Amino acid sequence: MDEIWQYADRARTQLGTADAPVISYTGLWLLLALVAPAADDRAIIEALGLPAEQARETAEKLIAEAHPTVAAALGAWLADWVEPTAALPVDVEPLPDQNTLNAWAAEHTRELIKTMPVTVDDDTMLLLATALVTTPTWTDPLTIEDGRLVLRKSLQAIVETSIGPVAVARPASRDGVDVFSVIAAPDVPAEDVWVAVAEVIEQYAAGAVSHLSHPDDLADGHAWTVKRERREYVAYEAPEPNSVVFTTRLPAWNADAAHDLGIAPGVVAVADGIAARLPEQDGGIRFSCAQNATASYDQHGFKAAAVTAMAWMAGSARPEYVERKIRHVQVSFDRPHAVVAIARGGAWDGVPLFEAWVTPEMFTTAEFDWPSPSAPA
């Protein structure tokens, strides 16, 4: 789904969210695409990468598509005192109270998100929301040493990119979602790391990156050391003589984030298009667009969910949006790195579900809750 990857790039730049703890650009893309026919088609093509009707069809197909661990839903609610002046692009239900909306968020995110990202009141005219959730488990639980996760099998590689070599780790999952962790040199800005992430995914899709991929002149790097050593293996598990063997230490982590998405690509076009179908208000019609997102990564798997909502309210004219960017302090050990979860198979194949910029503040101590497989000698 190149259009969603490209949208994520544009939104990340426009919102300044390269170092967001967790965010789902796909959740926003789905919301905008589902109501795209209400907006100017040129603006939709520029923002979403597809004509409005095609964008809606794509979003509808994704929501309807069965997937082992990815689920998406649309909610649309209209206040009983609002009579649209033209047909809305989605079917709507009566606008309920906040508790009912919060319950909808929890129901459609497997209880990972308990609140709708916008608050409704007597001025709320229309509310649209998408929910997106994925909960893949690793094929084999990761081992734990000194409070850190240890990956010995599955994809581990050193990959050359436009920003230099990066280390890549991807535990195997049986659930149709690949979760890549990518770490670059500590002086590389977060926004440039995401460029490298896209290059890694492109190389992986082309078969140019696989387990144990590394440069011919492999040597110590910014996040790895290379040592020559002798180790004993069970005969049938022993690698070839002089082989390269990877062991990757990863943090367990969790993150919650709330985002104001009002200046994201396509949001204003959709907001204006929908507002034109609502009855005029003495004080004008304002809108908001926000997302609540959560993610966690531990020895058993990855969980992430996002609820993205747009609301139209009677009241003052549209508020001004001021772009802000907050950078997290990077520490000298267990450095920040990028994580992206990508769906495999069916209509969802290749869709980047969630991004996370994992910082030490998000790390948690990995603890056993069942016996872990023994590590090789």
Image (tube, grey):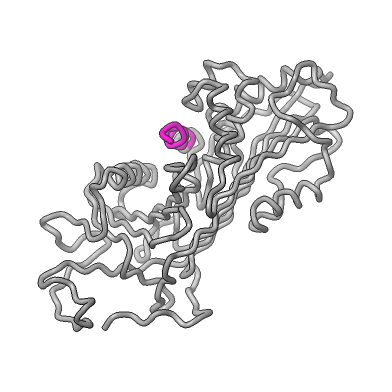
Give me the residue at 47% from left, 25% from top: 49
Q: Residue furthest right?
A: 81
Main secondary structure along the magenta-highlighted residues: helix
The answer to whether residue 3 is magenta is yes
| Magenta residue span | 1-11
In this view, the residue in front, 192 or 37, is: 37
Give me the residue at 65% from left, 43% from top: 73
Against 105, residue 56 (above or below) is above
Q: Quadrant of residue 222?
A: bottom left
Q: Residue 217 appears at what percent x and percent y?
A: 11, 57
Against 7, residue 159 (above or below) is below
Q: Residue 343 appears at what percent x and percent y?
A: 46, 48
Q: Is residue 258 visible?
A: no
In this view, the residue in front, 315 or 44, is: 44
Q: Residue 348 appears at what percent x and percent y?
A: 49, 42
Against 280, residue 181 (above or below) is below
Q: Is residue 27 left or right of residue 92?
A: left
Q: Quadrant of the C terminus?
A: bottom left
Q: Residue 271 appears at what percent x and percent y?
A: 66, 25
Q: Quadrant of residue 87?
A: top right
Q: How many marks?
A: 0
Give me the residue at 51% from left, 36% from top: 15
Give me the residue at 76% from left, 24% from top: 285
Q: Quadrant of the N terminus?
A: top left
